Amino acid sequence: MQLSAEIVEEIASQVTDGYYDRDAIIEGILSSYADQLEIATGTDGSFERGDVPPAAMAALDAAIAAAFAAKAEAMRSWPAETDCDRIRDVFRGLTERGWFTQENCGVTLQQGAELAWDHALDQEAATGARPAGFCFFHQQDVMSAVDGDGLLLCFGIFEDGETSVDIERCRAAGEIVAAACRDNGFDVAWDGTPDSRILLRGFRWQHRGPHA
């Protein structure tokens, strides 16, 4: 079976993102492209791995192996420390200060915010306190960074309401994130307002991630 250009591009994109190993990529492709892969599904669209035609699985395996091989070759010219390593250092520092941080947090801004709040409420239930703040980027942000448009960060505090005190605290949270990014060598663009996101200009997406 010959895979469509759409599937091949999706595999390459997920390998480039660097958050998915072979099994995760296969699972996602099978779910999204069952019709193209000629998978016999039930009336509700469900199927088992055994329903996947052997030719389709072989083609997926070959395409995924080729994508990882191409990435491995590209990585040979990457610097020892990439921008992805440095933003991870930023997040690690914020986490040590009691913040919630997460890379690739959901697909959209709304999903990322929901995941952050879920974590905050779970922590509050367990410890009696929410995290001091949050900072994350989501899957669409990763796609923009891969395209060379820089990396956008979402930040804020876990407070109910929209009082002036909350706004000032949220602005202060942004200053903490912006300063941490500058300290790690990033070119930060932010207008200083709590309702705008922080942009890391010139961010080069070079995420090693899983290798197979």
Image (spheres, helix red, strand yellow):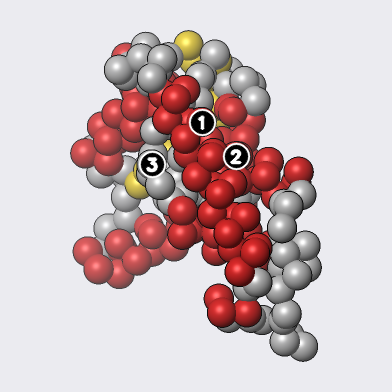
- Asked whether residue 98 is in view, the answer is yes
Identified at 72% across, 52% down, the residue is 3
Could you tell me how far apart the alpha carbons at marks 1 and 2 are, in whole angstroms? Answer: 9 Å
Mark sitting earlier along the chain (3/1): 1
Mark sitting earlier along the chain (2/3): 2
Callout 3: SS: loop
Quadrant including the N terminus: bottom right
Q: Which mark is residue 211?
A: 3
Could you tell me how far apart the alpha carbons at marks 2 and 3 are, in whole angstroms? Answer: 13 Å
Could you tell me how far apart the alpha carbons at marks 3 and 1 are, in whole angstroms? Answer: 11 Å
**Amino acid type of the residue that numbered disc 1 sits on in the rendered structure:** Ala
Q: Which mark is residue 196?
A: none
Q: List the residue tagged with mark 2.
A: 12
**Percent from the top left, x then y, of residue 33?**
72, 62
- Asked whether residue 113 is in view, the answer is no
Q: Which mark is residue 70?
A: 1
Callout 2: SS: helix
**Amino acid type of the residue that numbered disc 3 sits on in the rendered structure:** His
Q: Which of pointers 3 and 1 indicates the residue nearer the eye?
A: 1
Callout 1: SS: helix
Identified at 38% across, 19% down, the residue is 76
- Quarter occupied by residue 53: bottom right
Whether tag 1 and tag 2 are in contact, CB under 8 A, the answer is yes
**Percent from the top left, x then y, of residue 139?**
57, 44
Observer-nearest of 151 and 59:
59
**Percent from the top left, x then y, of residue 26?**
55, 59
Residue 32, placed above or below residue 145: below
Q: Which of pointers 1 and 2 indicates the residue nearer the eye?
A: 1
- Quarter occupied by residue 147: top right
Q: Residues within 10 Å of mark 3 (few under 14, many from 20)?
A: some
Identified at 29% across, 29% down, the residue is 89
